[in-house]
Amino acid sequence: MNPLFHVIFQMTRMLNKEVNQALKKHELFASQWTVLLCVYQQGEMTLTQIWKYLNVEAPTITRTVNRLEELGWLITHEGKDRREKIVRLSDEAITKFPEVESSIIQFENEFLTGLTVEEQVQLMTLLRKMDKEGLM
């Protein structure tokens, strides 16, 4: 195995763990945060749009959205056809979002202190070069 992939996998696991720690006080997990951020940035979305955008399996998104709905973060309603589910942030989520976002920004700033802005841009450029499907 190329050692680069080992480092990427290790970093991904560590980042996920640290983001979960930053979100703990909001009673959220990283996977839930990615859905909330996606819906916040994109506005109302179907479940299909969410899983395609996040490149996550449909059943995983369905479970995450259902849980976020139970927790009061999301509101869902039927689309044009009964099988289509449309998702949006609840009023409560819109109110709480800046506080959660602030926790994430604080985490990101602390995590990135070892990289200059130029190095961050370079890393993003390199990671995007690896994206065969053009998702990033």
Image (cartoon, helix red, strand yellow):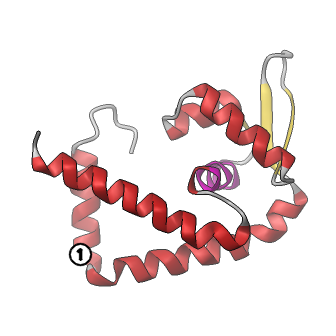
Residue kind at label 1, given as amino acid type: Glu
Residue 100 drawn at (x, y percent): 68, 71
- In the rendered image, the quadrant that contains the N terminus is top left
Please state the total of marks drawn on the protein image. Answer: 1
Residue 112 drawn at (x, y percent): 35, 77
Q: Is residue 135 above or below residue 80?
A: below
Q: Is residue 38 left or right of residue 46?
A: left
Q: Is residue 93 left or right of residue 50?
A: right
Is 41 one of the magenta-colored residues? Answer: yes
Read off the magenta span: 32-42
Q: Is residue 126 left or right of residue 66?
A: left
Is 37 one of the magenta-colored residues? Answer: yes
Q: Quadrant of residue 53?
A: top right
Which residue lies at the image location 54% right of the left edge and 76% below the top edge? Answer: 105
Residue 120 drawn at (x, y percent): 28, 70
Q: Is residue 55 above or below residue 22?
A: above
Which residue lies at the image location 83% right of the left edge and 69% below the top edge? Answer: 95
**Which residue is tagged 1?**
118
Magenta segment, prevailing SS (helix, strand or loop): helix
Q: Is residue 91 above or below residue 86?
A: below
